[in-house]
Amino acid sequence: MAQKRKLLDQVRDAVRLKNYSYRTEKAYTQWIRRFILFHQKRHPEEMGRDEVEAFLTHLAVTDNVAASTQNQALSAVLFLYNEVLHKPIGSVDVTWAKKPVRLPVVLTKEEVSTVMHHLSGVSLLVIQLLYGGGLRLAEGLRLRVQDIDFGQKLLMVRDGKGQKDRTTTLPDVVVPGLQAHLCAVKQLHHDDLQQGNGRVPLPTALAKKYPNAEREWVWQFVFPSKRLSRNPWGDDETWYRYHLHESTIQRAVRKAAQRSGIEKRVNPHTFRHSFATHLLEAGYDIRTIQELLGHKDVKTTMIYTHVANRGMLGVRSPLDTL
């Protein structure tokens, strides 16, 4: 008789069946482990809504976590009960963490140019795409060769936030540098194939449907890692070439901002905020910007109206009229 898989292994199986990202898998398993430890290692089968509510309230009241953190914990625990244990617990009544209303940090066009002046190579290309197409950092690093349409000047963002695909703009300025970069990446891929490697991880369903696709050029990452590594989702000893780690670009941007002397909290996501704000200032429709950013609700996009130059009403301070 086959031994029943451990709970967290069952969670991983369910996450992969849903084709969720590896980041989601890690987050869910970490929160479920934390939920179990909070209740002195009791098995979730023995617990229910009361224990879930106690855990989530503790996060908000005692641990003082952010609202987004508490929501992630809720999603993880609900996933456990709905998809793994098949014991839905319905709605929960907890003390919710207060979600702060903060305006995004936005750079002026001159500041964007200044920071980019202190970037080079792959880091510069990545930031140019983040600012030029409004990408999240993870979306930029997950781009594959086939996601770039030089003919139509489009970027295809696959499996973005909320597991949605969308298209956005490919800036003319970045095309020559990006094409030269892809030539170097193609040579790297050729060398990998010669050494018996050349594989990239594919979404679970695609990997099963197209078992040879992992070696094909069109599936390679645009910004590959310098080192090969094991597949965290697999049990085999196969080596894969993943994309660059986010920390590589984060460090480069932090150093560039410091050299620029800009007294703002600058990180890669700042360029996505700046993309949206500058489009708004240029007179583009809020719905168009919403589509380019991949926002589910236009209310999320509307936050940029508060940081656009002079605001949506073009208000001028009375001090300037004296």
Image (cartoon, helix red, strand yellow):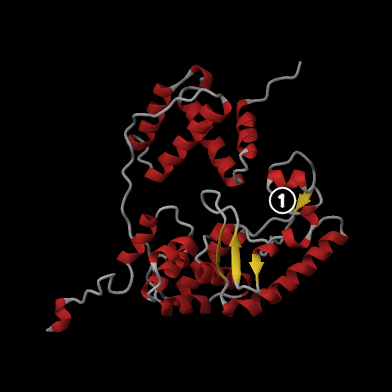
Residue 60 picture quarter: top left
Q: Position of residue 302 (x, y in %)?
A: 35, 60
Q: Is residue 162 above or below residue 120?
A: above
Q: Is residue 7 above or below residue 212?
A: above
Residue 98 picture quarter: top left
Q: Secondary structure at mark 1?
A: loop
Q: Tell me the residue at 54%/41% (across/down).
A: 27
Q: Position of residue 319 (x, y in %)?
A: 15, 79
Nearer to the camera, 118 or 106: 106
- Extreme left residue here? 322
Residue 231 visible: no
- Extreme bottom residue here? 322
- Relative placement, left or right, of 36 versus 317 is right
- Relative placement, left or right, of 287 versus 190 is left
Residue 234 picture quarter: top right
Q: Position of residue 274 (x, y in %)?
A: 42, 69
Residue 215 visible: yes
Q: Position of residue 313 (x, y in %)?
A: 25, 71
Q: Tell me the residue at 58%/72% (across/down).
A: 170
Q: Tell me the residue at 79%/58% (across/down).
A: 216
Q: Is residue 258 above or below residue 162?
A: below
Q: Which residue is mark 1?
A: 201
How many residues crowd mark 1 within 10 Å: few (<14), some (14–19), many (20+)? many
